[in-house]
Image (tube, helix red, strand yellow):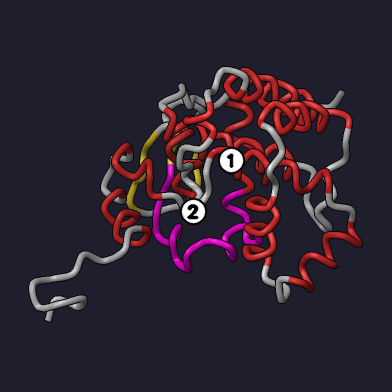
Amino acid sequence: MNEIDALMDAERTRILGVLEELDDEQWNAPSLCAGWRVRDVVVHLLMPYHLTVPRFLGNMAAAGFKFDAMADRWARKNNRPTRHITEALRQTAKARFRIPGAPPEAPLCHLVIHAQDIYRPLGVDHTIDARSANIVLDQLATPQARRALKPGLLDGLAFAAHDSGWNYGTGAEVIGSASALVTTLAGRPAAIHELTGSGAAHIRRRLLPPVPGPGGPTGT
């Protein structure tokens, strides 16, 4: 078993333990993914394992080749009982991550990021294993990943995870836990208040929508 597989097993075991304790209200609670319940996020975690490449391309075509629209349709249409969804997630240990062109780290990143989308709104401990966190953060800072982020989100900033030793970039400092940085660099504003340093205000302005001024949306 390689390092990524071992880390995946640990993260999968942890999220399964959390899901097995949830009641119906928690399964249907909002996640950090806009418009998705916790159950929708868990169903989304199954998508790369259940869609073959031909089915993936067929679903993309049906959604006008818009990945977000395709993923949203996949997540919302699944009405299986939660116990079946949990068991399906358990079985991904024996399955292959099928997203075309995905790097070896992609399954771990997918699981860790979306686990945060579940843990944080439910008030579950969201600390991330340091090695897993650093791998995910490295991937979020790659040119490929940055193309999916809000333009300029990371520019001119020096990020540091105080609990995992991860560092990236130069400029004004943005300091936080690995969990807070994973959540923020994945484009979620939920952990912005946990960030400190001279660059924290910059990332807040970049990630949060502008507050309308007294004269209207532009403040004029």
Disc 1 crowd, CA 10 A, few/some/many (<14, 14-19, 20+): many
Which corner quadrant of the image does residue 8 belong to? top right
Q: Is residue 171 magenta?
A: no
Q: Is residue 33 above or below residue 206?
A: above
Q: Residue at x 58, y 33 (%)?
A: 133
- Please state the extent of the stretch shown in magenta in the rendering: 140-159
The residue shown at (38%, 35%) is 176
Residue 70: x and y in percent read: 69, 63
Name the spot of residue 147 as percent of width and height, x first.
59, 65
Residue to which mark 1 is pinned: 114
Three-letter amino acid code at the position of disc 2: Gly
Question: Disc 1 vs disc 2: which is toward the camera?
Answer: 2
Residue drawn 33% across the image and 52% down it? 172
Disc 1 to disc 2, C-alpha distance: 14 Å
Would residue 129 appear left or right of 84 to someone viewing this image? left
| Quadrant in the rendering for residue 114 | top right
Q: Nearer the viewer, residue 75 or 214?
A: 75
Which disc is residue 35 wearing? 2
Q: Amino acid at mark 1?
A: His
The mark nearer the N terminus, 1 or 2, is 2
Give percent across and percent down for residue 169: 47, 51
Q: Nearer the viewer, residue 75 or 176?
A: 75
Question: Which quarter of the figure is the N terminus placed in?
Answer: top right
Main secondary structure along the magenta-highlighted residues:
loop
